[in-house]
Image (spheres, helix red, strand yellow):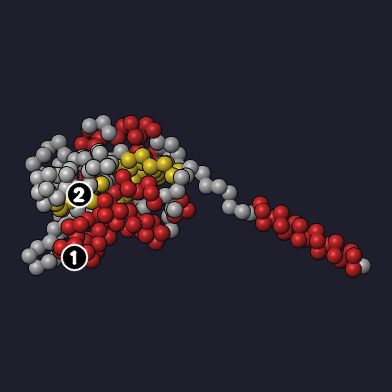
Amino acid sequence: MKTYKFAIIALLLLVMGCKSVQTVESPLSTVTIHMIGDSTMANKINPDENPERGWGQVLPQFFNEKVIIKNHAVNGRSTKSFRELNHWQPVLESLQPGNYVFIQFGHNDGKETDPTRYTNPQTAYRYNLIRYVEETRAKGAIPILFSSIARRRFNAEGVLLDSHGNYTLQARLVAQEMNVPFFDMQYLTEQMEVLYGVEDSKKLHLHFNPGENAYFPEGITDNTHLSVLGATEICKLFVEELKRQKSTLVSYLR
C-alpha cells in the first residue's frame, strides 16, 4: 500500500511539474511603435557631435530587443503640415495590426504667422488629431495621444508659464472622447522644469555660451529643444506613466 501511495504522489508531482513548465510565460512577440510629431520628438542629425536630442531618439534604450521604434517625427511639423508634406501617408501604409502610433503635436500648430502650419486648437487641430486616431484604428493599430512637452518659460518671479494654450487641452479631450490612452507630457514636464528650478532647468535644454560647445560655436539659448539630459528625463517620465497606466508595453521595458 505504501508503495502504491508513493507512486501516486510521484505521479502527481510529475504532472504538476509538467504544468509549471507549460505555464511559463511564452516569449514576447515583437512590437512596433511608430512615432509622429515635431522636433521635440524627432531624431537629430550628427548625434556624436550634436548635443540636441528628441525624446523619441532616446526612447529605444528603455525598451528591450522585442520593441522596434520607428521615429517618423520631423522638425517643424504640425498636425497639418505633417500630413500635407506627405510624412503621414507612408506611415499609414506601413501600419500593421497591433502596431502602436504615438501622436504628439502642438508646438508648431500654434504658429499664427505661418498658414502652412497653423491650426485653430478648437477646430482644425482637434479634427486633425481625430483623423490620425481614426486612420490608425482602421489599420488595426493602437493610437496613443500625448500633450506637448513644456517649454522652459519662467517669469521674473520664477513661475513657469504655459506656452501651449488650448492645444494640450484639446489633445486631452480627444483622448477622452475617443477612449485613447493619453500621456499628459505637458503636466509631467512642467513638474520636471519646476523641480530642476530656474537655473538648473537650462541643463534640460540647449544653453551654451560662445565657444562652450563645438557644435554651436557662437552659443545658443534654446528653451524648447532638448539636451541629452532633457530627452532622457522625459523618457523616464514616460516610462513611469506607462507603468502607472498599466500599459501592456510595460512588459517590454528593460
Q: Is residue 24 left or right of residue 46?
A: right
Residue denoted by label 1: 197
Residue type, mark 2 in image: His
- Dividing the picture into quadrants, the one containing residue 200 is bottom left
Can I make out residue 125 in this image?
Answer: yes
Mark 2 neighbour density, 10 Å: few (under 14) some (14–19) many (20 or more): many
Residue 167 left/right relative to 25: left
* Residue placed most toward the observer, 91 or 143: 91
Q: CA distance from mark 1 to mark 2?
A: 17 Å
**Residue sitting at x 22%, y 47%:** 51
**For the point 22% across and 33% down, which residue is it?**
84
The answer to which of marks 1 and 2 sits earlier in the sequence is: 1
Q: Which mark is residue 220?
A: none
Residue 133 can be seen, yes or no: no
* Place of residue 157 in the rendered image (x, y in percent of width and height, measured from the top left): 9, 68
Tell me: residue 89, above or below residue 122.
Answer: above
**Left or right relative to 2: residue 172:** left
Mark 1: which amino acid?
Gly
* Relative image position of residue 235 (x, y in whole percent): 32, 54
Does 216 sit above or below residue 164?
A: above
Q: Residue at x 80, y 59 (%)?
A: 11
Task: Give x and y (percent) for residue 124.
Answer: 20, 43
Q: Position of residue 221 (x, y in %)?
A: 12, 51
Residue that badge 2 annotates: 225
Q: Secondary structure at mark 2?
A: loop
| Mark 1 residue element | helix
Quarter of the image holding residue 199?
bottom left
Q: Residue at x 76, y 57 (%)?
A: 14
Q: Split into 4 quadrants, where in the image is the N terminus?
A: bottom right
